[in-house]
Image (cartoon, helix red, strand yellow):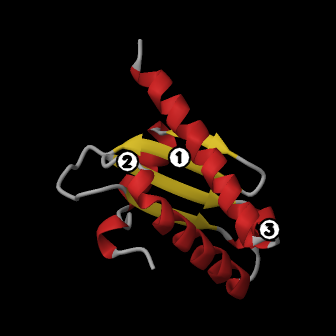
Amino acid sequence: MLSAAHRMRRAADFEQAVRRGARGGRDTLVVHLTTKTDHSASGPVVGLVVSKAVGNAVTRNLVKRRLRELVRARLTALPADAGIVVRALPPAATQPYALLGADLDAALETAERRARRRVIP
C-alpha cells in the first residue's frame, strides 16, 4: 500500500505533472515526472490514472494495486521533490507483474533523463 504522505490527491497536482512534466512512455504505461512546488510534504508524491480503456472495474483495480506496489517499492530511489503520475495503458491489463515493473523502471528512467535535460540550458 502506498502511504498517504506519498499519494497525489489534488487535480491541480495531476494537471501540473501531466502538462508540465517530463514524460517517459512504454507500451503498457506512461510516466509524467515534475518537480513539486509545494515542499510541505516529505518525499515524492505519486498519482495513478487507470481509465476505463484498460478494462472493467475488476481489471482496473488489479492494475492499480500492481502499480501502487511497484511504485511503493521504488519510492526511496525517486527524487524527494518529485511529483509523478503513472498512466496505465490498455496493454497493462494483460502484462505480467515482472514485465510491468520493468516497463515502469524504463519509463521512470526516461522521464528522469528528460527532466534533467530540461533543467540544463
Q: Residue furthest left?
A: 40
The numbered mark at residue 82 is 2
Mark 1 falls on what kind of element? strand
Q: CA distance from mark 2 to mark 3?
A: 26 Å
Q: Position of residue 87 (x, y in %)?
A: 61, 58
Q: On the picture, is 11 further left or further right than 100? A: left
Q: Position of residue 3 (x, y in %)?
A: 35, 75
CB-based contact (under 8 Å), mark 2 and mark 3: no
Question: Mark 3 — residue?
Answer: 95
Q: Residue at x 65, y 46 (%)?
A: 106
Q: CA distance from mark 3 to mark 1?
A: 20 Å
Q: On the picture, is 92 further left or further right than 14? A: right
- Mark 3: give few (<14), some (14-19) or many (20+) Cα within 10 Å: some
Q: Residue at x 61, y 51 (%)?
A: 105
**Residue 110 picture quarter:** top right
Q: Amino acid at mark 3?
A: Gln
